[in-house]
Image: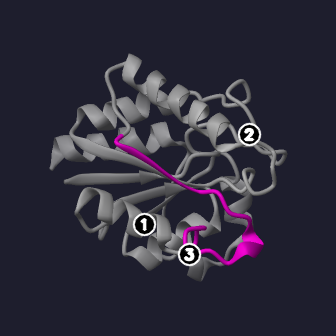
Amino acid sequence: MKLIILDRDGVINEDSDDYIKSVDEWIPIPGSIEAIAALSAAGYTIVVATNQSGIARKYFDEHELAAMHQKMSLLVEEIGGHISGVFFCPHGPEEGCECRKPELGLIKQIETEFGTSVEGAPFVGDTSKDILVAKLAGCCPILVKTGKGVATLAEISAAELAGVEIFDSLKDFAENLLKKEIFS
């Protein structure tokens, strides 16, 4: 199985410091939906792993979150792609759960659901938590400059960036990966 794990906010859709609280606020980053569809068409299994503490904070509920994920999935499906799973942590940072990135709970859920290891799979994110969980899980950490990506680059050390591939966007990552496949 060729697996790719994507963070959601700031990678697939526009991010907001005020949280994405509704379907109307869920706006795809230009090129992200097409990137997912292209990766899916190339045989990749695409899954999303996302912290959604807005639920714990009561900014939105699981029904609204499901509607956002349905919108995301339908947009991808409309152009021939498929998102195989969306895994989310509904807890706040103070709850000490095992599923909030950079903890490995979401990764373990993905491995269980698909009966596979995530070892070596690209994990595309825009924050230091995404980089850390990718490294802890044995994934290939990918940082995109969309969302909080530029701020993350400015905040983290060179040591934390070791082994991290950096791309302008999910679209840029997908084009690069698919180009590599053609020439390998």
**Residue type, label 2:** Ile
Q: Can residue 98 be found in the magenta stretch?
A: yes
**Mark 3 = which residue?**
98
Asked if the residue under mark 3 is in contact with the one under mark 2, i.e. CB atoms within 8 Å, the reply is no
- Residue 73, placed above or below residue 167: above
Q: At 81% from the left edge and 55% from the top edge, which residue is drawn?
A: 57
Q: Secondary structure at mark 3?
A: loop
Q: List x then y, in percent, for residue 51.
A: 62, 57
Q: At 62% from the left edge and 74% from the top edge, which residue is drawn?
A: 97
Between 29 and 66, the residue placed more toward the observer is 66
The mark nearer the N terminus, 1 or 2, is: 2
Determine crowd level at label 3: few under 14, some 14-19, many 20+ residues with C-alpha closer than 10 A: some
- Residue 140, placed above or below residue 51: below
Image quadrant occupied by the N terminus: bottom left
Q: CA distance from mark 1 to mark 3?
A: 10 Å
**Residue type, label 3:** Glu
Determine crowd level at label 2: few under 14, some 14-19, many 20+ residues with C-alpha closer than 10 A: many
**Mark 1 = which residue?**
107
Q: List x then y, in percent, for residue 124.
A: 48, 54
Question: Viewed as shown, does residue 178 lie left or right of 78?
Answer: left
Q: List x then y, in percent, for residue 29.
A: 60, 32
Question: Viewed as shown, does residue 25 lie left or right of 182?
Answer: right
**Residue type, label 1:** Ile
Q: CA distance from mark 2 to mark 3?
A: 23 Å
Give me the disc on residue 20: 2
Q: List x then y, in percent, for residue 84.
A: 34, 42
Span shown in magenta: 84-102
The mark nearer the N terminus, 1 or 3, is: 3
The mark nearer the N terminus, 2 or 3, is: 2
Q: Can residue 100 be found in the magenta stretch?
A: yes
Asked if the residue under mark 2 is in contact with the one under mark 1, i.e. CB atoms within 8 Å, the reply is no
